[in-house]
Image (cartoon, grey):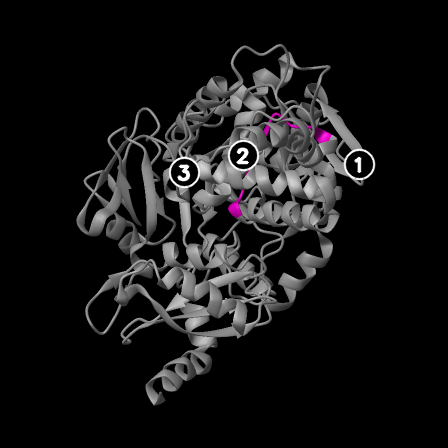
Amino acid sequence: MPFIGDIFAQLKRAAGTTVLQEISDRQVTSVTGNELLEKVRKARTFLATQHLQKGDRCGLLAANSVHWVAMDLAAMAEGLIVVPLYSRQAPPELAAMIKDSTPSLICCGDAALRDAIRKIFPDAPPYYLFDEIFIGGEGVRLDRPQVRDSDPVTIIYTSGTSGEAKGVVLTAANVGFMLGCTSARLDQLMGRRSGPDHIFHYLPFNFCASWIAILTFMLRGSLITLNTDLTKIANDIPAVAPHYFLNVPQLLERMRRGVEEEIGKKGGTVHAVYSRARAAWERRRSQHAESGDALWHWLGNSFVFPAIRKKLFGTNLKALISGSAPLTPETQDYFGMLGVRVLQVYGLTETTGICTMDDPANPVPGRVGPAIPGIEMELAENDEIIVRGPNIFTEYWNRPEQTTEVLHDGWFHTGDQGERDASGSWRIAGRIKNLIVLGSGHKIAPESIEEKIAIGLPLAQQVVVVGNGRGYLSAIVTGPVSSEQVQTALDAVNAELPHYKQVRAFCRRAEAFSIENGMLTANGKLKRDVIAVRMKIEIEEMYQVKQAV
């Protein structure tokens, strides 16, 4: 078995060593390499009794856990195609994915979620709870090879920012290639190691990059700690004291705001040193250093920043890794001020999660690093990024027409706009489908404008720029912000923009866009088409008011 066999071999080498654990209220439940292999064996024994055929689909619907990992490895080892499903996704969306992928069975960690799906999809395939799967006795040891490089091992559904989610088919060869790339880059980060990497992991395994990460960590013999309660992340991270971990920009932005608020509440000497050290850092970065800046920066590095790092991350942190969406340069630079490297990765499910990775020795704020060795990245029409290499998916499940729309002569058309600098490092400008075309004909990528506005509105949850076919841009701002605050932020941003990129009207929405209200995808991206439909009245009012004036 390709990469699966390599992971099993690593677990055997770590027979008596803790390799995977769950943390709940700082209480840890762990398994050794042998114990995890035993869980995999029990799951394979159970699957063997279901009379499944190689290539049958196996749904996996559960929150992150040791059992999820064991079930995933077992199903792939048995030659099944795993369909990971997000436990927090709305039941109707999950039902649509189940109907599309037609799994022969679904392994589920949550009886309540199973019952919710059954109500709207009574003809669903049989469900088995983990409690039923992992109680098996000795059973039969199943060591026979079942997987070849060309075999599909998973169907991962994309976020579906517009329209229905599509199932991306990845092969063992796709995954094996990517694991070699990610492990090599982590070797660069860690250098010579005296022990296993300590990992904290909270991102759901049904996201491609999160899944690739967890497989990479196991292959490297890391000690992986799984968060089981997203509300406890702030407490769990320093308790684990990881060397690095995978993040989405939303968490890093929240950490940044939290530090600012807490320092502000403390006041006194700490606040004074922090504020002056931060101002000195920003002036130095913009090459406008003043006399005395070196002293304030030294005071911050000596007395304030180390305490912040320790409280947030513990004492072992080498770097943060950020993916899923572009991280603002300001936030990446902010963590740099604290002495924390933030390494960005860029990729899509169709590229097995990753196309580029920051060089640990030279991360550049606002960029996502060079293409990983072994793949090609170029720019096509409209500055669209196209990718070719062993990481490119084979097809969208049961969607041949949509497959041929994005795959041409081996090149995958990502739909993302980008640019590459002289060193080969990439910047992601936005999605081509998100381009706003004003009535004047100007084409505008909204993402960079949204980022700039959000910097001036630290309490805002989201900023969404609209205006397709209109005479000017407007913005929807969610969260606890006042009209005065929004206008001040817009005035500051507009002053730096050409007239056609200026945002001239806005509306506020107290409730944030979320997965639960259907306005965000499963991995937190804006469903712009849905927002435009749901907020049609508010959008029309923004243009009527301005036109009346």
Tell me the residue at 50%/36% (across/down): 281
Residue 29 at x, y percent in the picture = 78, 32
Confirm whether residue 51 shows in the render.
no
Please report whichever mark, 2 or 1, sits nearer to the chain's N-terminal start. 1
Image height of 211 relative to 232, above or below: above
Residue carrying label 1: 26
Tell me the residue at 61%/34% (across/down): 48
Residue 124 at x, y percent in the picture = 58, 59
Q: Answer few, some or many: residues within 10 Å of disc 3's Cα (few below 14, many 20 plus, some between 14 and 19).
A: few
Please report whichever mark, 3 or 2, sits nearer to the chain's N-terminal start. 3
Kind of residue indicated by mark 1:
Arg
Distance from label 3 to label 2 (Cα)? 16 Å
SS under mark 3: loop
Residue carrying label 3: 288
Magenta residue check for 245: yes
Distance from label 2 to label 1 (Cα)? 29 Å
Image height of 121 relative to 420, above or below: below
In-image side of 377 versus 8 (left or right): left
Kind of residue indicated by mark 3:
His
Residue carrying label 2: 337
Image height of 20 relative to 386, above or below: above
Residue 395 placement: quadrant: top left
Q: Does the CB distance between marks 3 and 2 fall below 8 Å?
A: no
Confirm whether residue 427 shows in the render.
yes
Q: Answer few, some or many: residues within 10 Å of disc 2's Cα (few below 14, many 20 plus, some between 14 and 19).
A: some
Residue 141 at x, y percent in the picture = 65, 22
Kind of residue indicated by mark 2:
Met
The quarter in which the C terminus is drawn is: bottom left
Q: Which residue occupies the foreground of this view, 291 or 92?
A: 291
In-image side of 23 versus 83 (left or right): right
| Mark carried by residue 184 | none
Tell me the residue at 27%/55% (across/down): 401
